[in-house]
Amino acid sequence: MKTTSQKKSNRLPQESKLSAQAAQAQPTDAPAKPDNRLPIDTEARKKNRTLPTEKVLALLQQQDRRLWELAEVVGKWIWVSFSEQPAPTVRQTLAQLGFHWNRTRQAWQHPCGQFRLSSAGDPHEKYQSYQPADMTTN
């Protein structure tokens, strides 16, 4: 004979009814968090995400040399990391160029047309990496 198991609750039936009524009495519409992001051109962003590494580095250097100096090429992707949260205008520039924030790696990343799912390990162990600013001699 098959039986179904049910979770037993330590609450009395009246307590569960009261908590359900209390939840209904509270407004469910919390004030929406304002969107403080600066506007970007989404079509240009989509196009920029398909550019090869060299062209993205050139755009980065042209837009903001400080960002280019922070850039690290990992495989064919470009990563930009900061010690503190960058200013909104810097985040806007990165987003417009096609970068996205990777919370796990704490870096802004650009796929350079090489779209991949996230990897379990550290990409530094699998791919060659370098800083373009270190490679040039001025």
Image (tube, rainbow, N blue to C red):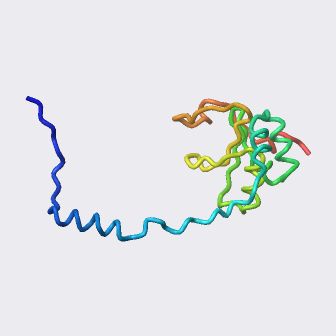
- Residue 66 is left or right of residue 23, and the answer is right
Residue under the image location 64 percent in, 49 percent down: 101
Residue under the image location 15 percent in, 59 percent down: 10
Residue furthest toward the left? 1
Q: Is residue 125 above or below residue 24?
A: above
The count of marks equals 0
Q: Is residue 33 above or below residue 69?
A: below
> Looking at the image, which is closer to me, 121 or 98?
98
- Residue 14 is left or right of residue 54, and the answer is left
Residue 135 x, y percent position in the rendering: 82, 39
* The quadrant where residue 99 appears: top right
- Residue 44 is left or right of residue 33, and the answer is right
> Looking at the image, which is closer to me, 20 or 116?
20
Locate the C terminus and report the quarter of the image it occupies: top right
Residue under the image location 78 percent in, 53 percent down: 93
> Looking at the image, which is closer to me, 27 or 133?
27
- Residue 87 is left or right of residue 24, and the answer is right
Residue 104 x, y percent position in the rendering: 55, 46
Locate the N terminus and report the quarter of the image it occupies: top left
Residue under the image location 82 percent in, 46 percent down: 60
* The quadrant where residue 46 appears: top right
Residue 52 x, y percent position in the rendering: 79, 33
